[in-house]
Image (spheres, grey):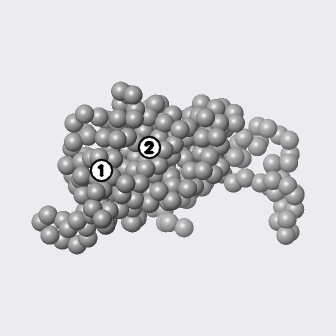
Amino acid sequence: MRLDIVTIFPEYLEPLNVSLVGKARAAGRLDVRVHDLRAFTHDRHHTVDDTPYGGGPGMVMKPEPWGEALDAVLASGAGDDPVIVVPTPSGRPFTQELAQELSAARWLVFTPARYEGIDRRVIEEYGARLDVREVSIGDYVLAGGEAPVLVMVEAIARLLPGVLGNADSHRDDSFAPGAMAGLLEGPVHTKPPEWRGRTVPEVLISGHHGRIARWRRDEALRRTAANRPDLIERCDPAALDRHDLATLAELGWEPGEDGRFGRASGRVEE
Ligand code: JBZ
């Protein structure tokens, strides 16, 4: 997969040289090219921003440098069309499903902005010819799109064939489809068996694979109910067995008329 990233802070993308993504690059599975947006300006101050039409606070990124930068990146692609990913707080949520969809692309171009974002006409211009996705990594306020690009690239790169050591590594991902679909992962333990007086749950050293799987699933369910009640609400009760239902009932969750889980009435939040 080829990735191009256009930014006024190329050094912000240095983490792409490290760890999983760095190794995927070194192994030739990822071709990452970071471009300095200011290289596509022509004034002595390398200006990339200007005041907003209509007034208001902050500055807006000028369209001309983005147009020149994107034209240059596109021209380097030998006729191939990339998917353009525009990080913006007003974008569609970045999910594991979107990561999977984007991991199927041959070429992605990311356009992390600063200030109040990019002049709308840039998104319109390239959106008229190419697949342009406005994407947000979550509901918090950031100062620019570079950190979201690091997040998205890591999520996408680890899905590429040959990037994670073995195909099984995807199986237990909290948001991967499968038996534990839609549940958070439970706690993990390793040696030593006792640390600062704290022991590893007995079941994990019991050698009873059935009991271990059941314990893990139960812990996953409890954590999901505690930290992500929205995932319990979305969960299909038909995907759960009697033990799961008993655990959820103990936590105050019951399947309702609509076939979805809700907090059982008369229960008080703990
Ligand atoms: C994002 C000015 O550029 C920004 C600013 C905030 C921001 C993004 C881009 S992308 N927040 C998010 O994904 O939450």
Secondary element at tag 1: helix
- Mark identifier at residue 155: none
Residue at the (24%, 52%) spot, across then down = 64
Tell me, yes or no, whether the two marked residues, 1 and 2, touch with CB atoms within 8 Å.
no
The residue indicated by pointer 1 is 66
C-alpha span from label 1 to label 2: 13 Å
Q: Is residue 137 visible?
A: no
Residue type at mark 1 is: Trp
The residue furthest top is: 79
Q: Is residue 69 visible?
A: yes
Location of residue 205 in the rendering, given as x and y in whole percent from the top left corner: 85, 48
Location of residue 226 in the rendering, given as x and y in whole percent from the top left corner: 55, 59
The residue furthest front is: 44
Secondary element at tag 2: strand
Location of residue 1 in the rendering, given as x and y in whole percent from the top left corner: 51, 34
Is 229 displayed left or right of 246 in the figure? left
The residue furthest bottom is: 57
Residue at the (44%, 60%) spot, across then down = 9
Residue 234 position by quadrant: top left
The residue indicated by pointer 2 is 4
Relative vertical location of residue 197 with respect to residue 6 in this rendering, above or below: below
Residue type at mark 2 is: Asp
Is 19 displayed left or right of 31 in the figure? right
Q: In the image shown, does 235 or 62 lie closer to the viewer?
A: 62
How many residues crowd around disc 1 within 10 Å: few (fewer than 14), some, or many (20 or more)? many
Q: Earlier in the sequence, mark 1 or mark 2?
A: 2
Location of residue 30 in the rendering, given as x and y in whole percent from the top left corner: 56, 37
Is 182 displayed left or right of 6 in the figure? right
How many residues crowd around disc 2 within 10 Å: few (fewer than 14), some, or many (20 or more)? many
Q: In the image shown, does 255 or 208 lie closer to the viewer?
A: 208
Residue at the (76%, 37%) spot, across then down = 210
